[in-house]
Amino acid sequence: MDMTTCLKSLLLAIQQYRDGRTAYNAAQLQKQVEEVSGLKCEKLLSSGHVLPHECVSGLVELAGNPNTSPTLTSSIISLLVQLACDDNSREILNSSYNLTSTLASVIHCHSATPGEPLVLQCLQVLQKLTYNTRIFQSANYIHELIAFLMTNIQSHNDDIIMPCLGLMANLCRDNHSVQSHIKSLDNVKPFYRTLINFLAHNSLTVVVFTLSILASLTLNEKVGEKLFDAKNIHQTFQLVFNIIVNGDGTLTRKYSVDLLVDLLKNPKIADNLTRYQHFSACVSQVLGLLQSKDPDSAAKVLELLLAMCSVSGLCSLLCEVVFKPAGPKLRAAGRRQGAGLEGGRKAESGLALVQWLSSPVEGAESCSLQALQLLSELLEEALGAESVSECVLSFIEMLLPVLLGLLKGLDPAQGDAHLRKQCHRITHVTSLLLILCAEDSTRSLVSRQVSAQLCLSQVESLLSCCHSNSPLTCLPPGSDSDLSQVCAEALLRTLELMSKLRQQVKDMETSFYRMLQDQRIVTPLSLALTSHHRERVQTGLALLFEATPLPDFPSLVLGESIAANNAYRQREAELSVKRVAVQEVPLSRMNTSVLDSSSGSSRSVHSLVEKIQNGLELQEQAKDSHVSEIIDIYEQKLSAFASKESRLQDLLEAKALALSQADRLIAQYRFQRAQAEAEACKLGCLLKEAERRREDLQGELSSQVLEVERSKADMEELLQHNARLQQDSEEHQALKGAYNALLNRFNESERLLKELQAAHISLTKQNDSLRKNHEALQLQHEKMASALEEREEEIRSLQTDLQQKNSDIAGLRGELRDEVRKVEEKDQERRDLEETVDVLRKELNKTEQARKDASIKASSLELQKSQLEVKLKQKEDELNKHSAMISMIHSLSSGKMKSDVNLSL
């Protein structure tokens, strides 16, 4: 069954369950949910279709209904988690469907039984949804959720403490409204004490969650100053680095990295990290995590390294760790161009970074971009030093083929999303190459490997992506994520690289100026000049300065494009004064219920804003904990109005674009008509000039006839002269034959000379190869000789050990002989005792017959007999002990003799 049919059946089951909450309808809905769970649901939410939207809306509504059975709710939540397979889907579930509030309501309904599986499932799903996501504390059931988390964190239930700590860490991180709400609660001090006690917990994950919560809540307070002061911070660094390297898993590593990134935002803690004595060793171990194939772990490690690069004192230390150990191997890697990044080079941290550069665009593109940003930061720091070390140059020499390989393969046919990712990668790669071009030593390395054809093909591909075939089409300026902006930025970066290398690379200057005169360059150049990014404007101005003196540069079209972009921006700014303030906050997707409730007129909104402002002025002295809630709600409403205005502005923009295009076409038509009239006037003047020249030529023709008659007489004289020249020609042919023969001999000699030179060159190469082989064999011989000496020394040590063992065996054999002799003596004594016993037995028989006559004598004899039997048993026990010792000695001697034999072998 395909996805569409399953979704239709699921939607029907949801409607039936809404109409009648019977056991049969619940079972049917459970069955449909399980069937959809068994299918692949990747990017189902981001497809934009109505059917998945209706199904998810119904499922979220049923999950939040207290009357829904826990089993069905658990199945629905499992399906929703399966749908949230990527960041975009999680954002849609969190913002458009308000899943966070729904799960919080489920937890609130079952708060009396926190150990229930449904509650644990909701906590785990919320931890996944709220990671790196800002949640407004004014949302439904968020206050109840925070109270539930604080209560259960202070409980003694270990099963629920960890998910509660993780969710609390997500809610507190970079969320001032939630932080202020928690600090305003009455039980915050016992909560702090519980968290501090958790720092001694056995689980590293619990410790990381606790440190993250404490850092978010107390970093700028007295409690935080005591926890993270100069005495304790080094232990905290060591603990966090150990957790990152030897953590319980990817989840613990993520939160550890986030914790260290948050701590680095504090200037005092960042300064303490620069003085941390084990920093280089810890960073080396962290860089070792890049050798794994897990993109999530690599992304978090690269995020941490980028955060460290933002601290001035740490960037130079990172350069030492990344570049210096890799230096000795990079020259050999540069000579083995086909060897790739395998083998022994994997152990180097710098090479692990390069491995992530060539990761595929789909799947691990964030790791590739992060690695490019990190290398840009590190190389900029390394090249900014007084002198560039050989290790850095060797690393750059190895890095350049990988970077140039990333510039190839731009394919617009794979879709806009793939093209946007490729353009982002090209932008970062060219930015890194521009950093390398800042120094003369590295610019020479770049110029040796970059070709003009590569840059030219790259510019052509980008022009075809960001502009249509019509040179007069001018796209309006869009957002930073717009495909035209992304392609334009990549194109300008490539042109800037061509400008840097035009003097060092062959044909680069010609290609650069030819591209600047292409009319398609108008669109990206106008977007750059009217951009609000300073770097793009500076790049556009630099290219404009180069292109202005060129004869075919379309300056008129560029001016019209810039004017249209500026007019668009001016109209956009005039629509709403408050839109700029709203746009400074990143707009998230609004909940559908919030959008419906924000459909009032702009006049009522302005009046409400004035009332809120007046109320805030009156309550300025009192600390109202709900001020942030009110601000968030009205920010959402203002953003809703801004979205409506943006849609109207898009329509105005389309009309303005059509008008500007029509004006440009009219101007072009008028220009072409004036040009045609000027050409017609010019052709009339040329016709008059041709008539005048015809009359002059007629007079010249009559004079030429007279000259022809004179030339006939001259012809006869020339024929006579020709006969004489014929004789000279025959003589010349004879001389020419002799010259050809000499020339053939010369060519033959030259060919033989070239063959001899080629043979000499080949022999020279063979001689060089033989000399290198001889040196390699001599080095190998020396290594073998040293190894042979070591083996001989080992043999001598083994011989001395063997002699020692032989002497020990001889001593043991002597002891064995003594023991055998003693055993024989004991045997003799035993035999004597046996004979004595026999005699006594005979005497006993005799005394038994005369017992009646001599009872006193018999009793004494019986006493003697018992004493002798006791002695006999003692002797037998001693004999058994001696026999056991003899067998043990025999076994020991046989084992040692075997080992000695093995050693001798």
Image: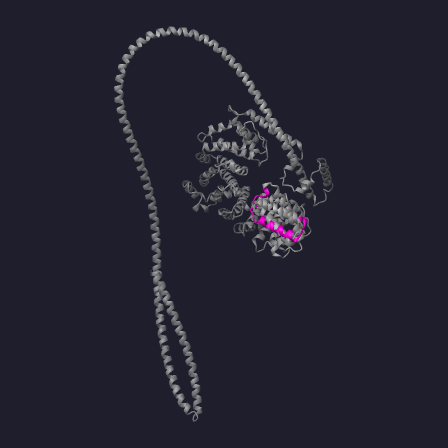
| Residue 38 drawn in magenta | yes
Question: Where 825 sits versus 14, above or below?
Answer: below
Describe the colour scheme in one phrase. one colour
Q: Give the residues in magenta.
A: 18-46
The one nearer the camera, 745 or 49, is 49
Question: In this image, 19 relative to 308: left or right?
Answer: right
Quadrant showing the C terminus = bottom left
Which x, y percent locates residue 490? 52, 34
- Residue farthest bottom in this picture: 853
- Report if residue 64 is visible in the image: no
At horizontal 41% and vertical 76% (from top left) the residue drawn is 878
Compared across the picture, whether 529 is left or right of 813 comes to right
Specify whether residue 442 is painted magenta.
Answer: no
- In the rendered view, tell whether residue 668 sits above or below residue 41: above
Whether residue 457 is visible here, answered yes or no, is: yes
Q: Main secondary structure of the magenta part?
A: helix
How many numbered circles are shown?
0
134 or 693: nearer the eye?
A: 693
Closer to the camera in the image, 38 or 797: 38
Q: At which x and y percent is residue 346?
A: 45, 46
Front residue (pair 670, 857): 670
Q: At 31% across and 37% down in the image, what residue appears?
A: 762
Residue 445 placement (x, y as % from top left): 44, 36
Q: Position of residue 897 (x, y in %)?
A: 35, 65
